[in-house]
Image (cartoon, helix red, strand yellow):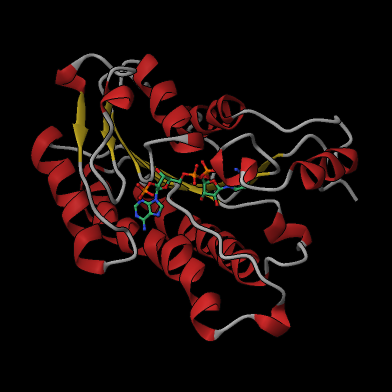
Amino acid sequence: MDLQDKTVLVTGSTRGIGLAIAKAFYSRGCNIVLNSRHAIPEEVLKQLPDNNRVFSAIGDVADEKEAQYIVEQTIEHFHQIDVLVNNAGINRDMLANRMSSEDFQAPIKTNLIGSFNVTQPALKTMYHQKRGSIINISSVVALIGNIGQLNYAASKAGLIGLTKTLAREAARRHVRCNAIAPGMISTDMVSALAEKNQEQLKKQIPLGDFGSPDEVAQAAVFLAENDYVTGQVITIDGGLSMA
Ligand code: NDP
């Protein structure tokens, strides 16, 4: 897909990986729809200065109606949706024996059901356009597991199943669906970990350090641009998940 003038909706794009992805597509000449549950901060908007190419659609992807409204606003504003990046995500880490049902469900509601909530209305337009690329931000823990992240890993593993199934269903309508499985990436989610834990984690990574949001964003741009890739999971993890 030639990205110039295409419309890209990135959920959860006010910081971290989502913001890096939004900026990467912006720099390729795309129209960008930013999203989060809260108003988009001024300092974020300053990083994408062309007002004509940037629109904010505030809403909680975990809420079916709000998710639908995010997509409706995108189409009303830019009249198309070419790339959807399901990036909004939360974690609620806890050991399995102490995890409440509510704690188990919270990441599933945002990460998995939230992605479905946005994907379904976007698909209708993509099918009509006979063009589209959906990119789901999963996680390396979906592939290898991680102590304390039963709920999060389940949500991200579900997203891989969703990705592969949708890739099969949507291919004949020229819509592609792929996933990215980042490892440890330097964002608020990771800096919330104690410094000692961060150092221990780095020792497990063959490349010896955390990745950057921009390195994940590069993969997203590749997946949107390359018309012959679908149903794939690209791992960006410094070698963490190598067998
Ligand atoms: P951050 O916590 O830094 O940012 C998350 C973004 O999502 C924010 O913009 C937040 O804004 C938004 N958000 C959260 N919940 C919702 C919701 N229900 N509806 C709409 N927006 C929402 O996360 P990261 O940048 O670290 O992670 C981004 C994605 O990458 C997530 O899916 C995460 O699981 C995944 N990932 C991250 C890794 C890492 O090492 N950082 C590793 C592997 C995967 P607000 O709170 O204002 O709504």
- Quadrant of the image for the N terminus? top left
203 over 62 or under it: above or below: above
Residue 49 horizontal side relative to residue 77, left or right? right
Query: In the image, what residue occupies the spot 37% across and 21% down?
Result: 2
Q: Position of residue 135 (x, y in %)?
A: 47, 45
Q: Position of residue 203 (x, y in %)?
A: 90, 39
87 over 221 or under it: above or below: below
Query: In the image, what residue occupies the spot 60% across and 71% down?
Result: 151
Give residue 34's quadrant in the image.
Answer: top left
Q: Position of residue 68 (x, y in %)?
A: 20, 59
In front of the other: 223 or 1: 223
Q: Position of residue 47 (x, y in %)?
A: 34, 17
In front of the other: 103 or 221: 103
190 over 118 or under it: above or below: above
Residue 221 horizontal side relative to residue 193, left or right? left
Report the label total. Answer: 0
Query: In the image, what residue occupies the spot 31% across and 57% down?
Result: 118
Residue positioned most to the left: 76
Residue 97 horizontal side relative to residue 106, left or right? right
Give residue 186's quadrant in the image.
Answer: top right
In front of the other: 233 or 41: 41
